[in-house]
Amino acid sequence: MFGFCCQDAYLSIMLRLLSLLFVLAFSTGLPIFSQTGPAGVGSSTNNAVWLKADAGTSSSANNTAISYWNDQSGNSVNATQTVSAQQPSFATSVINGFPAILFDNNSTSGQNDKMLGPDLPVLDNTSGYTFFTVTRPMNLDGNARVIVSKRTTVSVDESFMLFYYTSNKLTIDIETTDDRFASNMTYSNNVNFISCLQYNGSATTASRCALYSEETFDKYATETATLVPDHASPLILGSTDASDGRPYGGYTSEIIIYREFLAPAKRIIVNNYLSAKYNIALSANDKYLGDNSSNGDYDREVAGVGQESTGNNTSFSASVSGGLSLSAVSGLDNGDYILAGHAVATNTTITTDVGGMTGSNNARWLRVWFVDVTNTLTNIGTNIEFSMSSGGMSTFTLGQVYNYVLLYRAGQSGNWTELSSASAITGDRIQFNSITLVNDGYYTLGTRDYNNSPLPVQLLYFKAEPGQQQVNLSWGTVTEKHTNCFIIERSQNGIDFETVATVKAAGESQDLKTYAAIDKSPVSGLSYYRLTEFTTDGIKNHFPLVAVSMDQDNTMIIYPNPSEGLFTICLPVAAGTPVELSANDASGREVCKRTVLAESNKLLFETGGLKAGTYLLRIAFMGRVLEKKIILK
């Protein structure tokens, strides 16, 4: 999209030398950014399964059944369910604003929610495991409530099972049921938990299994097996066996399985990632303070490096941290950690809040990382890299290397300090080598000359909102270079698309531009909308899909549902029309009643002091009465 031009021959030679030096440095043993597992720990080789509710689900619409939940580890251990009665549902904003998968509490034969994954070699035939789960149990009662298992039936082809059981303890099977053990800790309903189980077949029999809750050690347990062999059984979510009728009855947000015993430093980093993301406090080894509200809640995509006496994690990839790669190349001593996380879901380029920068036409990434440095002795030397594609930026050509700078400031506002100019550019990646990290604070990528060394044009937002028999579409850009037009497409399966609207683009702009379109013929049920940018030089850039759920009866639409207390109701009424709202609880008792004036075909319903639960909302207007179930979280 942008041209690269260096008119000075000397600069051209220097750039080539920098690139050569970068190649030489990496060929002499410096770590490569290959750690693509959760929090930058491991890769598909040892990270067997990575299921997270904010990625890979067949739907991201609230309260919608899902038919698949795709593995993010790279091993394609995808969980599926083709029987509609047994499909769990996607739930938005369950734990710290992140979604979860809700498995029902239906114990009727053939009705309990569950998902099955394939029997792949990566799942067993191993002498080590590390499991992480993020759950909110809802129906603990002493019965078996299974988070994840791999077996055909009791002790048959059983590699493992993690489940809540007797006395509401977390209970573990490794290689059949012969050494089953339960946690010391008692678990409660409607509480969020991070649990970690480790199995080490080479340890002494009495301590081959270790259990942690929120990174606090719970217990060692005896396990006689030194190896979990290759069992012919599927991975199962929400049930003991593929045919078992007992329900899980709760939420699961994340399941991570490593086919090895993770060293403590790696375990600590993954637990810090989960703690930040889901706002579940660690009671030990909390190494990341960026998730505190006083520091701005930098909860997203936390990744890290660290070292303990028994092992280390020396790098993490931009693909798991939202665009930032980091490798510790010197000074990483026992007890040292560097963890980084950001706070914005969608990255872009901004030309504001760039005080302290040198040069002209300054710009920086909107995405900023809080970096938490725990340093016990020697200063830690690092190589840092920003990846345009992993940072969510459009495809384009980078400019002069010396214009790109690593920015730092101690607080969330104020002038930036240029810590270093870039060392090299490789493809869409900008490298900063030999950076000594000492201070906690806020780091991002900037350019001293946005015109000649640009950061890419990027979408600021894209929204699709249900209206009265239509879907309202809106989006905004901060800057545009060579944009010709935007096309909106709609799909019912996320694969096959049809054009809904074409909108002329601004073309060249460094200011906020907003756009809107309307789909006047939306489809009933769930559909997906895609925004595509077309440039004047023939480049096509797709942006992420957004989902919209239209009721089969479009007379009334309520969203979001479930809600934390504020519902928007779309009705075929004029502004100022009085609408009577009343809510009945599960027993049929009226618990709320009020009259609201509509505002241009819609009104807001605030639930006030109602407790969390399911209610029947009765809506009376212009002689009509409509009813709909609503869920208050």
Image (cartoon, rainbow, N blue to C red):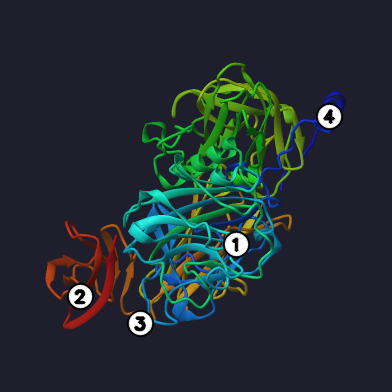
Residue 553 circle label: 3
Q: CA distance from mark 4 to mark 3?
A: 65 Å
Categorize mark 2 by other alpha carbons within 10 Å: few (<14), some (14-19), many (20+). some
Q: Is residue 417 above or below residue 75?
A: above
Residue assigned mark 1: 159
Local secondary structure at mark 3: loop
Which comes sooner in the sequence, label 1 or label 3? 1
Q: Nearer the viewer, residue 245 or 608?
A: 245
Which comes sooner in the sequence, label 3 or label 2? 3
Which dot, 1 or 3, sits closer to the camera? 1
Which comes sooner in the sequence, label 4 or label 3? 4
Q: Nearer the viewer, residue 264 or 606?
A: 264
Q: Residue at x 35, y 74 (%)?
A: 468
Q: CA distance from mark 4 to mark 2?
A: 71 Å
Q: Pointer 4 and pointer 3: residues touching (CB < 8 Å)? A: no
Residue assigned mark 2: 619
